[in-house]
Image (tube, grey):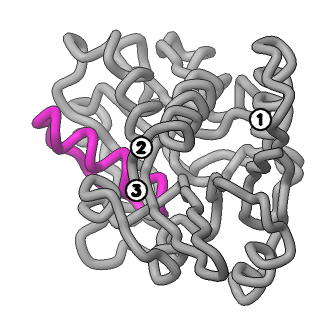
Amino acid sequence: MRRFGLIGYPLGHSFSRKYFTGKFLSEQIDDCSYDNYPLESLDGFYDLLRTIPDLAGLNVTIPYKSEIIRFLDTIDPEAEEIGAVNVLKIKRIKDKIEIAGFNSDVTGIRESIDPWLAEINQAMVLGTGGSSKAVCYVLGKYGFPFSRISRTGKEGTLGYQDITAELMEKTELIVNTTPLGMFPDTESWPDIDYDLLDKKHILFDLVYNPEITSFLKMGQERGCRIISGIRMLHSQAERSWEIWNSGQF
């Protein structure tokens, strides 16, 4: 049996276990399982690896996509450039455990925004965590100028209070990488002026539970096109599976 799973905290919002369990059933993969492993801190990470000897791979979610890097033996160059990892491949040689890190969020982000490339000239990224780093990486590779927005307006970012009507007017793609709106806190949303949105805007929410967040709903009400995080979830999950079953390490 090969075991896979998800680490992060909390994990009540996650659909990953449901997705992979359904995949294993539909594709008649009977030698694999997928479980959630909520860790309040990464202090328990090595204990998890030791107590589940057939654990072969993990996904990593908030808040550990950057912090997990210090545990890695090797890191994929793309994940290293991004500064965030959400896929771990685990190799066991006798008593030694080796861990390789990858980023499958990039695949999910690319496949989510590819259909809209012709309509994007500039973007805005809400949040500065591990997922935000992957979004900024993809936007940079496409050559789109973008603004980073954080609650504090730290170096290299703007605060929400700094978002002007002019900036909103020249921005087509707005990406929410924060957990605002995620189950169970579904009545929260990023603090932008939604009355400045119109049909030229494309709203992309990395939150996938619920599928249509308050952020996306308020955009829809003002004529925006929307991209749900559920598409990204499926894309990055399939990329994770490819990594776990490839020769990459």
CA separation in Å, label 2 and label 1: 32 Å
Secondary structure beneath dot 3 equals loop
Task: Report the residue at 47% width, 71% height from top.
Answer: 66
Which image quadrant: the N terminus?
top right
CA separation in Å, label 3 and label 1: 31 Å
Name the main secondary structure of what is drawn in magenta: helix
The answer to whether mark 2 and mark 3 are in CB contact below 8 A is yes
Indicate which disc residue 84 carries: none
Indicate which disc residue 247 carries: 2
CA separation in Å, label 2 and label 3: 6 Å
Q: Nearer the viewer, residue 84 or 31?
A: 31
Provide residue 20's location: percent of width, then percent of height: 77, 31
132 inside magenta stretch: yes
Left/right of residue 50 with respect to residue 192 in the rendered view: right
Provide residue 119's location: percent of width, then percent of height: 24, 13
Label 2 neighbourhood size at 10 Å, few (<14), some (14-19), many (20+)?
few
Which image quadrant: the C terminus?
bottom left
**Outermost residue to the bottom:** 43
In the image, which residues are magenta? 129-149
Task: Report the residue at 25% width, 58% height from top.
Answer: 77
Amino acid type at image mark 1: Asn
Q: Is residue 187 visible?
A: no
Q: Which residue is mark 3?
A: 249
Q: Which residue is mark 1?
A: 209
